[in-house]
């Protein structure tokens, strides 16, 4: 269920702050969002794959914590990420 390296590099290049940035909150949130989308499609087909469902819930929780951190520290970047990735805000 991992992302292929070409798709991962594309996401990183689009969301990075500067060249070589792979660990910023923005990049991590974008990569998690893509993995969540892939797992969601997988679970639509394989409804009884409970281990993947658990992994999906962990990814959603991690993304939620990163978004909470970003909202507290850099609100303007948070709003931009929410709009770019079409994430619902609660």
Image (cartoon, rainbow, N blue to C red):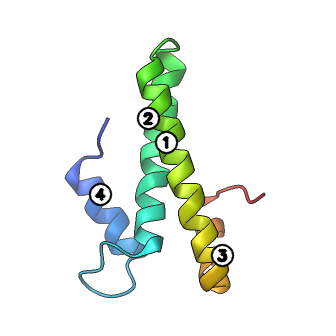
Crowding near the residue tagged with mark 1, few <14, some 14–19, many ≥20 C-alpha atoms within 10 Å: few
Tell me the number on the disc at residue 55. Answer: 2
Instruction: Give the answer, above or below, for where 71 lies relative to 10.
Output: below
**Marks 2 and 1: CB-CB under 8 Å?**
yes
Q: Earlier in the sequence, mark 4 or mark 1?
A: 4
Residue matched to label 4: 8
How far across and down, in percent of the image, does residue 69 sit? 58, 72
Rounded to the nearest angstrom, the CA distance separating label 3 from label 4 is 24 Å
Q: Secondary structure at mark 4?
A: helix
Q: Secondary structure at mark 3?
A: helix
Q: Secondary structure at mark 1?
A: helix
Tell me the number on the disc at residue 58. Answer: 1
Viewer-nearest of discs 4 and 1: 1
How far across and down, in percent of the image, does residue 15 sit? 42, 74
Rounded to the nearest angstrom, the CA distance separating label 2 from label 1 is 5 Å
Quarter the C terminus occupies? bottom right
Q: Is residue 48 left or right of residue 31?
A: right
Crowding near the residue tagged with mark 2, few <14, some 14–19, many ≥20 C-alpha atoms within 10 Å: few
Q: Earlier in the sequence, mark 2 or mark 3?
A: 2
Q: Earlier in the sequence, mark 4 or mark 2?
A: 4
How far across and down, in percent of the image, does residue 9 sit? 26, 63
What residue is rendered at 30% in x and 46% in y? 3
Tell me the number on the disc at residue 71. Answer: 3
Rounded to the nearest angstrom, the CA distance separating label 4 from label 2 is 19 Å
How far across and down, in percent of the image, does residue 6 sit? 23, 56
**Marks 3 and 1: CB-CB under 8 Å?**
no
Instruction: Give the answer, above or below, for where 29 lies relative to 46.
Output: below
């Amino acid at each position: 269920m991992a992302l292929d390296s070409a798709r991962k590099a594309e996401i990183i290049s689009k969301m990075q702050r500067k060249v070589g940035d792979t660990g910023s909150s923005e990049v991590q949130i974008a990569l998690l969002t893509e993995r969540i989308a892939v797992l969601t499609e997988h679970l639509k087909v394989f409804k009884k794959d409970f281990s993947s469902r658990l992994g999906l819930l962990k990814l959603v929780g991690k993304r939620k914590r990163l978004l909470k951190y970003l909202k507290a520290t850099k609100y303007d970047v948070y709003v931009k990420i929410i709009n770019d990735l079409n994430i619902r805000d609660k």
